[in-house]
Image (spheres, grey):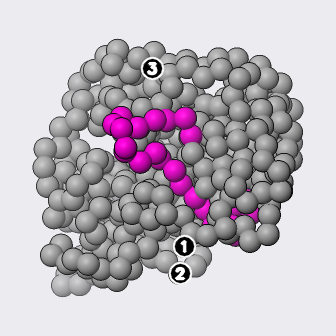
Protein backbone atom coordinates (compact mmCIF):
# COMPACT_ATOMS: atom_id res chain seq x y z
CA UNK A 1 0.00 0.00 0.00
CA UNK A 2 1.45 3.38 -0.99
CA UNK A 3 1.44 6.17 1.58
CA UNK A 4 2.63 9.68 0.71
CA UNK A 5 3.39 10.33 4.40
CA UNK A 6 5.91 7.49 4.29
CA UNK A 7 7.65 8.48 1.10
CA UNK A 8 11.17 7.49 0.16
CA UNK A 9 12.31 11.07 0.51
CA UNK A 10 10.87 11.43 4.03
CA UNK A 11 12.04 8.11 5.42
CA UNK A 12 15.12 7.23 3.41
CA UNK A 13 16.82 10.15 1.67
CA UNK A 14 15.88 12.54 4.44
CA UNK A 15 16.72 10.23 7.32
CA UNK A 16 20.26 11.57 7.60
CA UNK A 17 22.25 10.10 10.46
CA UNK A 18 20.76 8.16 13.34
CA UNK A 19 22.77 8.20 16.55
CA UNK A 20 22.26 6.83 20.03
CA UNK A 21 23.62 8.17 23.26
CA UNK A 22 25.75 5.64 25.11
CA UNK A 23 23.42 3.13 26.83
CA UNK A 24 25.62 3.32 29.93
CA UNK A 25 24.26 6.83 30.48
CA UNK A 26 20.78 5.50 31.15
CA UNK A 27 19.39 6.74 34.46
CA UNK A 28 17.91 3.92 36.46
CA UNK A 29 14.72 4.61 38.39
CA UNK A 30 12.87 2.32 40.77
CA UNK A 31 12.61 -1.46 40.87
CA UNK A 32 10.00 -3.95 39.73
CA UNK A 33 9.46 -7.54 40.85
CA UNK A 34 8.79 -9.85 37.89
CA UNK A 35 7.82 -12.69 40.24
CA UNK A 36 10.21 -15.20 38.68
CA UNK A 37 9.81 -18.58 40.38
CA UNK A 38 13.32 -19.86 39.70
CA UNK A 39 15.46 -16.95 40.79
CA UNK A 40 15.71 -13.28 41.75
CA UNK A 41 12.87 -11.33 40.14
CA UNK A 42 13.82 -7.74 40.97
CA UNK A 43 14.81 -5.59 37.99
CA UNK A 44 15.58 -1.86 37.72
CA UNK A 45 13.31 0.49 35.82
CA UNK A 46 14.76 3.06 33.46
CA UNK A 47 12.66 6.17 32.75
CA UNK A 48 15.48 7.81 30.76
CA UNK A 49 17.14 5.20 28.55
CA UNK A 50 17.82 6.96 25.20
CA UNK A 51 14.63 7.06 23.14
CA UNK A 52 12.63 5.09 25.69
CA UNK A 53 9.96 5.61 28.29
CA UNK A 54 9.97 3.53 31.44
CA UNK A 55 11.37 0.09 30.64
CA UNK A 56 12.47 -2.95 32.63
CA UNK A 57 16.25 -3.22 32.34
CA UNK A 58 17.47 -6.78 31.87
CA UNK A 59 20.87 -5.65 30.59
CA UNK A 60 22.35 -2.30 29.54
CA UNK A 61 25.03 -3.30 27.01
CA UNK A 62 24.11 -4.71 24.56
CA UNK A 63 20.65 -3.54 25.62
CA UNK A 64 17.92 -5.90 26.76
CA UNK A 65 14.88 -3.83 27.72
CA UNK A 66 11.53 -5.35 28.63
CA UNK A 67 8.15 -3.67 28.23
CA UNK A 68 6.14 -3.32 31.47
CA UNK A 69 2.80 -5.11 31.12
CA UNK A 70 0.95 -1.87 31.85
CA UNK A 71 2.00 -0.66 28.39
CA UNK A 72 -0.27 -3.31 26.84
CA UNK A 73 -3.37 -2.28 28.80
CA UNK A 74 -4.85 -0.05 26.08
CA UNK A 75 -5.08 -0.32 22.33
CA UNK A 76 -3.19 -2.78 20.15
CA UNK A 77 -0.16 -0.74 19.09
CA UNK A 78 2.93 -0.63 21.28
CA UNK A 79 4.49 2.86 21.07
CA UNK A 80 8.07 3.00 19.81
CA UNK A 81 9.33 4.24 23.16
CA UNK A 82 7.81 1.24 24.96
CA UNK A 83 8.74 -1.55 22.50
CA UNK A 84 11.09 -4.15 23.99
CA UNK A 85 14.73 -4.18 22.86
CA UNK A 86 16.81 -7.30 22.19
CA UNK A 87 20.36 -7.33 20.81
CA UNK A 88 22.65 -10.36 20.85
CA UNK A 89 25.80 -8.35 20.09
CA UNK A 90 26.91 -4.69 20.21
CA UNK A 91 25.81 -2.51 17.31
CA UNK A 92 26.92 0.83 15.81
CA UNK A 93 25.55 3.77 17.77
CA UNK A 94 25.68 5.96 14.66
CA UNK A 95 24.51 5.01 11.16
CA UNK A 96 24.66 7.36 8.15
CA UNK A 97 21.73 6.61 5.88
CA UNK A 98 23.36 8.10 2.77
CA UNK A 99 26.32 5.72 3.08
CA UNK A 100 24.45 2.54 4.02
CA UNK A 101 24.39 -0.33 1.52
CA UNK A 102 22.86 -3.79 1.49
CA UNK A 103 24.98 -6.34 -0.38
CA UNK A 104 23.14 -9.21 -2.11
CA UNK A 105 25.14 -12.21 -3.28
CA UNK A 106 25.31 -15.98 -3.34
CA UNK A 107 23.02 -17.86 -5.71
CA UNK A 108 21.93 -14.80 -7.69
CA UNK A 109 22.20 -13.81 -11.33
CA UNK A 110 24.12 -10.65 -10.49
CA UNK A 111 25.59 -9.55 -7.15
CA UNK A 112 24.48 -6.03 -6.23
CA UNK A 113 25.03 -3.44 -3.51
CA UNK A 114 21.88 -1.40 -2.97
CA UNK A 115 21.43 2.02 -1.41
CA UNK A 116 18.46 2.76 0.80
CA UNK A 117 16.84 4.69 -2.01
CA UNK A 118 17.27 1.74 -4.38
CA UNK A 119 15.72 -0.62 -1.82
CA UNK A 120 12.80 1.72 -1.23
CA UNK A 121 12.27 1.86 -4.99
CA UNK A 122 12.38 -1.91 -5.42
CA UNK A 123 8.63 -2.37 -5.27
CA UNK A 124 5.28 -1.43 -3.80
CA UNK A 125 5.37 0.12 -0.33
CA UNK A 126 3.57 -2.15 2.11
CA UNK A 127 2.23 -1.59 5.62
CA UNK A 128 1.49 -4.44 7.99
CA UNK A 129 0.64 -4.58 11.69
CA UNK A 130 2.53 -7.45 13.31
CA UNK A 131 3.77 -8.66 16.68
CA UNK A 132 7.50 -8.72 17.31
CA UNK A 133 8.12 -11.27 20.11
CA UNK A 134 11.38 -12.70 21.43
CA UNK A 135 11.51 -16.51 21.26
CA UNK A 136 12.44 -16.46 24.96
CA UNK A 137 9.58 -14.23 26.09
CA UNK A 138 8.43 -15.50 29.49
CA UNK A 139 11.57 -17.63 29.93
CA UNK A 140 12.05 -16.40 33.51
CA UNK A 141 8.73 -18.01 34.47
CA UNK A 142 9.91 -21.52 33.53
CA UNK A 143 9.97 -24.21 36.22
CA UNK A 144 12.53 -25.63 36.59
CA UNK A 145 14.65 -22.60 35.75
CA UNK A 146 16.43 -22.49 32.38
CA UNK A 147 19.43 -20.50 31.16
CA UNK A 148 19.23 -17.29 29.15
CA UNK A 149 17.73 -13.85 29.72
CA UNK A 150 15.15 -14.17 32.48
CA UNK A 151 12.36 -12.29 30.73
CA UNK A 152 8.95 -11.78 32.24
CA UNK A 153 6.17 -11.59 29.64
CA UNK A 154 7.17 -8.18 28.26
CA UNK A 155 9.62 -9.20 25.51
CA UNK A 156 7.04 -8.47 22.84
CA UNK A 157 5.15 -5.64 21.18
CA UNK A 158 2.86 -4.89 18.25
CA UNK A 159 3.67 -2.21 15.68
CA UNK A 160 2.83 -1.04 12.17
CA UNK A 161 5.79 -1.76 9.87
CA UNK A 162 6.40 -0.10 6.51
CA UNK A 163 8.75 -1.26 3.77
CA UNK A 164 9.00 -3.25 0.57
CA UNK A 165 8.67 -6.98 0.09
CA UNK A 166 11.87 -8.96 0.55
CA UNK A 167 11.16 -10.74 -2.74
CA UNK A 168 11.18 -7.41 -4.58
CA UNK A 169 14.59 -6.58 -3.11
CA UNK A 170 15.88 -10.02 -4.13
CA UNK A 171 14.61 -9.39 -7.65
CA UNK A 172 17.22 -6.62 -7.97
CA UNK A 173 19.83 -9.39 -8.05
CA UNK A 174 17.69 -12.17 -9.53
CA UNK A 175 17.53 -15.66 -8.08
CA UNK A 176 19.75 -18.29 -9.67
CA UNK A 177 18.67 -21.87 -10.31
CA UNK A 178 18.58 -23.99 -7.16
CA UNK A 179 18.04 -21.10 -4.71
CA UNK A 180 16.78 -22.67 -1.47
CA UNK A 181 17.21 -20.24 1.45
CA UNK A 182 17.78 -16.54 2.03
CA UNK A 183 20.37 -15.72 4.70
CA UNK A 184 20.94 -12.24 6.07
CA UNK A 185 22.95 -10.28 8.66
CA UNK A 186 23.09 -6.82 10.20
CA UNK A 187 25.77 -4.41 11.41
CA UNK A 188 26.08 -5.82 14.93
CA UNK A 189 29.48 -7.35 15.74
CA UNK A 190 30.65 -10.02 18.15
CA UNK A 191 32.23 -9.21 21.50
CA UNK A 192 34.93 -11.86 21.32
CA UNK A 193 37.15 -13.16 18.52
CA UNK A 194 35.80 -16.31 16.95
CA UNK A 195 32.27 -15.86 18.31
CA UNK A 196 29.54 -16.46 15.71
CA UNK A 197 28.01 -13.47 13.96
CA UNK A 198 24.24 -13.15 14.34
CA UNK A 199 23.05 -14.52 11.00
CA UNK A 200 19.58 -15.91 10.26
CA UNK A 201 17.86 -17.36 7.22
CA UNK A 202 14.43 -18.14 5.82
CA UNK A 203 13.34 -20.98 3.56
CA UNK A 204 12.57 -19.66 0.10
CA UNK A 205 8.80 -20.07 0.41
CA UNK A 206 8.82 -17.77 3.45
CA UNK A 207 11.16 -15.25 1.84
CA UNK A 208 8.77 -15.00 -1.13
CA UNK A 209 5.65 -14.30 0.97
CA UNK A 210 3.61 -11.15 0.36
CA UNK A 211 4.04 -9.96 3.94
CA UNK A 212 7.76 -10.54 4.60
CA UNK A 213 9.34 -7.10 4.43
CA UNK A 214 12.52 -5.12 4.36
CA UNK A 215 11.16 -2.34 6.58
CA UNK A 216 12.36 1.19 7.25
CA UNK A 217 9.49 2.53 9.35
CA UNK A 218 7.85 1.60 12.63
CA UNK A 219 4.54 3.19 13.63
CA UNK A 220 4.92 5.83 10.92
CA UNK A 221 8.42 6.93 11.90
CA UNK A 222 11.90 5.93 10.69
CA UNK A 223 13.13 2.91 12.64
CA UNK A 224 14.73 4.04 15.92
CA UNK A 225 18.35 2.96 16.08
CA UNK A 226 17.53 0.62 18.98
CA UNK A 227 15.11 -1.13 16.63
CA UNK A 228 17.41 -1.47 13.66
CA UNK A 229 17.79 1.80 11.73
CA UNK A 230 17.88 2.05 8.81
CA UNK A 231 16.41 -1.32 7.73
CA UNK A 232 15.22 -4.53 9.33
CA UNK A 233 13.59 -7.76 8.22
CA UNK A 234 9.95 -8.24 9.29
CA UNK A 235 8.53 -11.79 9.32
CA UNK A 236 4.90 -11.64 10.56
CA UNK A 237 3.85 -14.65 12.63
CA UNK A 238 7.42 -15.81 13.30
CA UNK A 239 9.55 -15.06 16.36
CA UNK A 240 11.78 -11.99 16.28
CA UNK A 241 15.00 -13.99 15.98
CA UNK A 242 14.29 -13.80 12.23
CA UNK A 243 13.68 -10.03 12.32
CA UNK A 244 17.33 -9.03 11.83
CA UNK A 245 18.06 -5.35 12.51
CA UNK A 246 20.42 -2.93 10.70
CA UNK A 247 20.23 -5.15 7.61
CA UNK A 248 23.54 -5.05 5.72
CA UNK A 249 23.98 -8.30 3.79
CA UNK A 250 21.81 -10.91 2.07
CA UNK A 251 23.10 -14.23 0.75
CA UNK A 252 21.02 -16.67 -1.28
CA UNK A 253 21.84 -20.30 -0.48
CA UNK A 254 21.40 -23.45 -2.57
CA UNK A 255 21.63 -25.73 0.48
CA UNK A 256 20.84 -25.76 4.16
CA UNK A 257 22.09 -23.07 6.51
CA UNK A 258 24.85 -24.31 8.80
CA UNK A 259 25.39 -21.00 10.63
CA UNK A 260 25.33 -21.07 14.44
CA UNK A 261 22.04 -19.25 15.08
CA UNK A 262 20.15 -21.56 12.72
CA UNK A 263 21.89 -24.94 12.95
CA UNK A 264 22.94 -24.90 16.61
CA UNK A 265 20.76 -22.51 18.61
CA UNK A 266 17.24 -21.05 18.52
CA UNK A 267 16.13 -24.66 18.28
CA UNK A 268 13.85 -26.74 20.47
CA UNK A 269 12.90 -30.41 20.88
CA UNK A 270 10.87 -32.05 18.14
CA UNK A 271 9.65 -34.59 20.72
CA UNK A 272 8.44 -34.11 24.33
CA UNK A 273 11.37 -33.95 26.78
CA UNK A 274 12.01 -33.82 30.51
CA UNK A 275 14.65 -31.66 32.24
CA UNK A 276 16.84 -34.77 32.47
CA UNK A 277 16.63 -35.66 28.76
CA UNK A 278 19.74 -35.66 26.57
CA UNK A 279 20.53 -36.24 22.90
CA UNK A 280 17.04 -35.52 21.57
CA UNK A 281 16.25 -34.24 18.05
CA UNK A 282 15.60 -30.53 17.59
CA UNK A 283 14.05 -28.23 15.00
CA UNK A 284 14.37 -24.46 14.55
CA UNK A 285 12.01 -22.17 16.44
CA UNK A 286 9.82 -20.55 13.79
CA UNK A 287 6.11 -19.71 14.14
CA UNK A 288 4.58 -18.17 17.24
CA UNK A 289 1.75 -19.94 19.08
CA UNK A 290 -1.38 -18.16 20.41
CA UNK A 291 -1.28 -16.34 23.75
CA UNK A 292 -3.66 -14.29 25.95
CA UNK A 293 -3.19 -12.01 28.96
CA UNK A 294 -5.29 -10.23 31.58
CA UNK A 295 -4.33 -6.55 31.87
CA UNK A 296 -7.21 -5.06 33.85
CA UNK A 297 -6.21 -6.76 37.13
CA UNK A 298 -2.86 -7.79 38.57
CA UNK A 299 -2.25 -11.00 40.47
CA UNK A 300 -3.58 -10.60 44.01
CA UNK A 301 -5.85 -7.66 43.20
CA UNK A 302 -8.92 -7.10 45.40
CA UNK A 303 -12.37 -7.10 43.77
CA UNK A 304 -15.75 -6.18 45.26
CA UNK A 305 -17.69 -9.17 46.57
CA UNK A 306 -21.31 -9.26 45.44
CA UNK A 307 -20.66 -6.79 42.59
CA UNK A 308 -20.28 -7.31 38.83
CA UNK A 309 -16.74 -7.68 37.53
CA UNK A 310 -15.33 -6.82 34.11
CA UNK A 311 -12.02 -8.32 33.07
CA UNK A 312 -10.06 -7.09 30.06
CA UNK A 313 -6.86 -7.88 28.24
CA UNK A 314 -5.33 -8.74 24.91
CA UNK A 315 -4.55 -11.86 22.93
CA UNK A 316 -3.06 -12.94 19.63
CA UNK A 317 -3.18 -15.98 17.38
CA UNK A 318 0.54 -16.32 16.66
CA UNK A 319 1.02 -17.31 13.04
CA UNK A 320 -2.72 -17.20 12.31
CA UNK A 321 -5.74 -15.08 13.12
CA UNK A 322 -7.25 -15.28 16.60
CA UNK A 323 -10.48 -17.29 16.70
CA UNK A 324 -11.60 -17.05 20.34
CA UNK A 325 -10.59 -16.29 23.91
CA UNK A 326 -12.08 -18.01 26.97
CA UNK A 327 -11.83 -17.13 30.65
CA UNK A 328 -10.94 -20.36 32.45
CA UNK A 329 -10.77 -21.40 36.07
CA UNK A 330 -11.60 -24.09 38.59
CA UNK A 331 -14.21 -24.41 41.31
CA UNK A 332 -16.91 -26.62 42.75
CA UNK A 333 -14.90 -29.71 41.96
CA UNK A 334 -14.19 -29.00 38.31
CA UNK A 335 -13.07 -26.61 35.65
CA UNK A 336 -15.16 -23.91 34.01
CA UNK A 337 -14.87 -21.59 31.05
CA UNK A 338 -16.67 -18.48 29.85
CA UNK A 339 -16.32 -17.14 26.30
CA UNK A 340 -14.90 -13.62 26.10
CA UNK A 341 -16.03 -10.86 23.76
CA UNK A 342 -13.41 -10.00 21.14
CA UNK A 343 -12.88 -6.35 20.30
CA UNK A 344 -12.61 -5.03 16.74
CA UNK A 345 -10.02 -6.65 14.49
CA UNK A 346 -8.04 -3.43 14.09
CA UNK A 347 -4.69 -4.80 12.98
CA UNK A 348 -5.29 -8.01 11.10
CA UNK A 349 -4.26 -11.60 11.68
CA UNK A 350 -0.77 -10.92 13.09
CA UNK A 351 -1.75 -8.21 15.59
CA UNK A 352 -2.85 -7.96 19.20
CA UNK A 353 -6.62 -7.99 19.72
CA UNK A 354 -8.49 -6.78 22.77
CA UNK A 355 -10.95 -8.97 24.67
CA UNK A 356 -13.32 -8.45 27.61
CA UNK A 357 -15.74 -10.45 29.74
CA UNK A 358 -18.32 -9.33 32.31
CA UNK A 359 -19.19 -11.52 35.29
CA UNK A 360 -22.61 -10.68 36.80
CA UNK A 361 -21.53 -11.14 40.41
CA UNK A 362 -18.38 -11.89 42.41
CA UNK A 363 -19.27 -14.68 44.84
CA UNK A 364 -15.80 -15.19 46.32
CA UNK A 365 -12.10 -15.39 45.56
CA UNK A 366 -10.93 -16.41 42.11
CA UNK A 367 -8.03 -18.80 42.52
CA UNK A 368 -5.88 -19.17 39.44
CA UNK A 369 -8.10 -17.78 36.70
CA UNK A 370 -6.66 -17.23 33.26
CA UNK A 371 -7.49 -16.63 29.63
CA UNK A 372 -6.97 -19.16 26.86
CA UNK A 373 -6.50 -18.17 23.22
CA UNK A 374 -7.22 -20.30 20.16
CA UNK A 375 -6.34 -19.46 16.57
CA UNK A 376 -8.11 -20.33 13.33
CA UNK A 377 -5.66 -23.18 12.69
CA UNK A 378 -6.90 -24.89 15.85
CA UNK A 379 -3.80 -24.18 17.98
CA UNK A 380 -4.81 -23.52 21.59
CA UNK A 381 -2.91 -22.60 24.74
CA UNK A 382 -2.11 -25.61 26.94
CA UNK A 383 -2.99 -25.96 30.61
CA UNK A 384 0.57 -27.00 31.50
CA UNK A 385 3.94 -25.61 30.47
CA UNK A 386 5.60 -27.41 27.56
CA UNK A 387 9.08 -27.27 29.08
CA UNK A 388 12.28 -26.98 27.06
CA UNK A 389 15.76 -26.19 28.27
CA UNK A 390 15.91 -22.82 26.48
CA UNK A 391 12.50 -21.61 27.61
CA UNK A 392 11.38 -20.99 24.05
CA UNK A 393 7.84 -20.38 22.78
CA UNK A 394 6.09 -20.14 26.14
CA UNK A 395 2.33 -20.14 25.66
CA UNK A 396 0.93 -21.85 28.76
CA UNK A 397 -2.25 -20.26 30.15
CA UNK A 398 -1.13 -17.37 32.40
CA UNK A 399 -3.13 -17.33 35.65
CA UNK A 400 -3.79 -14.83 38.42
CA UNK A 401 -5.69 -14.88 41.74
CA UNK A 402 -8.26 -12.23 42.70
CA UNK A 403 -9.38 -11.65 46.29
CA UNK A 404 -13.02 -10.76 47.02
CA UNK A 405 -13.82 -8.33 49.82
Number of residue marks: 3
Q: Which residue is depicted at the point 74% across and 21% down?
A: 98
Residue neighbourhood size for the residue with mark 1, other residues' Cα within 10 Å, grouped as few (<14), some (14–19), many (≥20): many
**Residue 50's disc number:** 3
Mark 3 lies on a secondary structure that is: loop
Residue 249 appears in the rendering: yes
Picture coordinates of residue 51 (x, y %)?
49, 22
N-term-proximal mark, 3 vs 1: 3
Q: Are marks 1 and 2 in contact (CB under 8 Å)?
A: yes
Residue 95: within the magenta?
A: no
| Residue at which label 1 appears | 375
Q: Are marks 3 and 1 in contact (CB under 8 Å)?
A: no
N-term-proximal mark, 3 vs 2: 3
In magenta, the rendered stretch is: 186-212
Instruction: Give the Cα separation between the discs numbered 1 and 2.
Output: 6 Å
| Residue at which label 2 appears | 378
Can you say whether 360 is above or below 250 in the image? Answer: below
Amino acid sequence: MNDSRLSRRALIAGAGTAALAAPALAKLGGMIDLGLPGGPGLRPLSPAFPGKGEMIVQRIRPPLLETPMEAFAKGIITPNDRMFVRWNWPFPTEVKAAEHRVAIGGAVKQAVSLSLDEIAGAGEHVEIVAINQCAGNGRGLSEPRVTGTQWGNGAMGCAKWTGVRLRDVLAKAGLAEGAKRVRYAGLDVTLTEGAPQFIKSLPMDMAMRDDVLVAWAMNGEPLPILHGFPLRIVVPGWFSTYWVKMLAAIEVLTGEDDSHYVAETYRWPSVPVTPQAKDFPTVPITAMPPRAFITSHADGAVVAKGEPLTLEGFAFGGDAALERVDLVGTGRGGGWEIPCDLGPDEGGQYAFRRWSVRLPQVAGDFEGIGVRAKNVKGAVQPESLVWNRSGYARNVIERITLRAQ
